[in-house]
Image: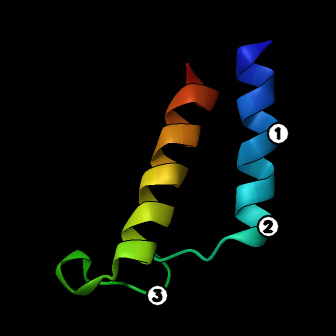
């Protein structure tokens, strides 16, 4: 159940949140908001996979 919930959130993230890897964002120059979005996406992806 937990995995399916995070898979649903991951699909919503993909549709709503920007992809910084496609924009080739330099992490050393990222703002706090951008780092928070990256962290959130990593957390959701990790939980959706396992």
Q: In this view of the protein, which residue sits in the foreground, 22 or 34?
A: 34
Q: In this view, does 39 lie above or below 49?
A: below
Using a 10 Å C-alpha cutoff, classify the residue at mark 1 as few (fewer than 14 neighbours), some (14 to 19) or many (20 or more): few
Is there a contact, CB below 8 Å, between mark 3 and mark 1? Answer: no
What mark, if any, has residue 15 been given in the picture?
2
- Looking at marks 3 and 1 on the same chain, the residue that comes earlier in the sequence is marked by 1
Residue drawn at 25 percent across, 75 percent down: 27
- Looking at marks 1 and 2 on the same chain, the residue that comes earlier in the sequence is marked by 1
x, y percentage for residue 30?
A: 30, 82
Q: In this view, does 23 lie above or below 1?
A: below
Which residue is disc 3 drawn over?
23
x, y percentage for residue 37?
A: 50, 64
User: On the picture, is 50 further left or further right than 24?
Assistant: right
| Alpha carbon separation for disc pair 1 and 2 | 11 Å
What mark, if any, has residue 8 been given in the picture?
1
The residue most toward the top is: 1
Residue drawn at 37 percent across, 68 percent down: 35
| Alpha carbon separation for disc pair 2 and 3 | 16 Å
SS at badge 2: helix
């Amino acid at each position: 159940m937990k995995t399916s919930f995070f898979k649903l959130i991951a699909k919503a993230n993909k549709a709503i949140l920007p992809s910084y890897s496609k924009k080739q964002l330099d992490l050393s120059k990222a703002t706090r908001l951008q780092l928070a979005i990256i962290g959130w996406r990593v957390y959701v992806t990790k939980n959706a996979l396992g």
